[in-house]
Amino acid sequence: MGENTAVTLDEFMGGLIKRNPGETEFHQAVKEVAASIFDFIADKPKYHKHQILRRIAEPDRVVSFRVCWEDDSGNIRVNRGWRVQCNNSIGPYKGGIRFHPSVTESILKFLAFEQTFKNSLTGLPMGGGKGGANFNPKGKTDNEVMRFCQSFMTELYRHVGEDTDVPAGDIGVGGREIGYMFGMYKRITNKFVGVLTGKGREYGGSPIRTEATGYGCVYFLEEMLKARNNSVAGKTALVSGSGNVAQYAVEKLLQLGAKPVTMSDSDGFIYDPEGITAEKLAWIQELKEKRRGRIEEYAAHFKGAQYHAGKRPWAVPAQVACPCATQNELQVADAHEMVKNGVIGVAEGANMPTTLDGVHVFQEARICYAPGKASNAGGVSVSGLEMSQNSARITWKEEELQRLLKDIMVGIHESCVQYGGEKGYVDYVKGANIAGFVKVADAMIAYGVT
């Protein structure tokens, strides 16, 4: 179906769904962006002539491969791996690798599509990509994880490189996994280059990379509230998740004077009416990183804390929220409950954690709502800075990186306001989508038909 002024959003989505059957997460991500872009490009013939939206919604390539490995009992195990290279118009493909049993091609296509706009917003020269495998690292020994990572990289190395595609970590892929994969890449290629980010400090990693997504999320939340003559200080905060993003969102909330009261994992959430202090957060970090325990242990350890099995934290009264766990964890009923409870600001630390209906609830209530492509861009921003450091064979000081991270998040906020401001309200979804789109689209046009 041709892309022209006569094509409606529903017709565009109908064509995309027909070409990508059953990929519901990908459909959701594209529709959320396209809904903003359609009005913006309505009077701009160049984007129609060059079929830009249709081209951006078609990944450059999707690589799928078998990953065979041997567990500690000598059994041969088989998983599937992917790398989705969505768009490299403004720089090498850049995006994480996710190891989780829920990983599918649809999820990785949605993430790569989102990553394209997120990376554009940072102002750094990075395209969009994503990868992963339906491998579950939970319950596996270090040796089993190592053998899987080495097998995964034995195929992936053909498709990545410091000037081609630079993966990072994501859910299920932390410093341990990055180390195993980088070691295998170095062994196969005999090259020591910045092909992965999120590396250990001793072999080319950047200061504050671990903290960057959580810190950036809260920086963005603070900028939104500041634009309304408000601040994070003194606010009760809901945080979901308990991995790196959630941990450092809590840390930055504490530093800015907020009181975070919840964290979660896939089994349930904890609520601490007294607040999760720096000392309690350090205990959680020990729990997760050293013992790989579950968040319910917090309630048994700290008096007054509650554990709610099988639930998410959105019904707890608060003023601000940072969903930092996974996609579609915040449903429309949750959004209604949060608005009723007085939430005034939501900044996403995860990728697409709020359903489309939930987003509409926040927008109709005119609260400050930041989509993940804007508010969780801190992680990939510092990844981009790590790429620069690797290329120059240097490491910048933490203070400089903290300053650059905050500057990037402030710059993203300004771009969102530029394109999303309307009658006393900033539609951050619209602002982020259009600001990210323009840079990529104009680069694509400059290349001709490619």
Image (tube, helix red, strand yellow):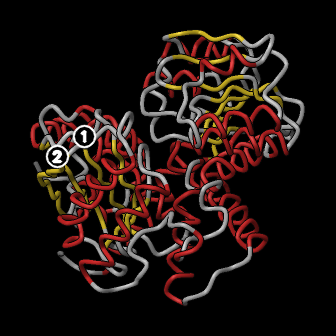
* Residue at the limit of the structure toward the front, as seen here: 73
Using the rendered view, name the quadrant where residue 225 is placed.
top right
Look at mark 2 in the image and give the residue it sits on. Answer: 80
116 sits left or right of 449 in the view: right
At horizontal 47% and vertical 23% (from top left) the residue drawn is 266
Local crowd at mark 1 within 10 Å, few (<14), some, or many (≥20)? some
Q: Is residue 9 above or below residue 1?
A: above
Q: Is residue 130 left or right of residue 266?
A: left
- Locate the C terminus by quadrant: bottom left
- Based on the displayed image, in which of its 4 quarters is residue 250 positioned? top right
Percent coordinates x, y for residue 151 in the rendering: 21, 59
Q: Is residue 229 above or below residue 157?
A: above
Numbered circles on residues, count? 2
Which residue is located at x 63 percent, y 11 percent? 307
Q: Give the residue at x 48% y 16%.
A: 332
Closer-to-camera residue (201/20): 201
- Residue where numbered disc 1 is placed: 134
Q: Nearer the viewer, residue 38 or 122?
A: 122
Q: Earlier in the sequence, mark 2 or mark 1?
A: 2
Please tell me whether mark 1 sits on a helix, a strand or a loop.
loop
Assign a secondary structure to mark 2: strand
Asked if one can make out residue 177 in the rendered structure from this viewpoint, the answer is: yes
Q: Position of residue 304 (x, y in %)?
A: 80, 10
Front residue (pair 363, 120): 120
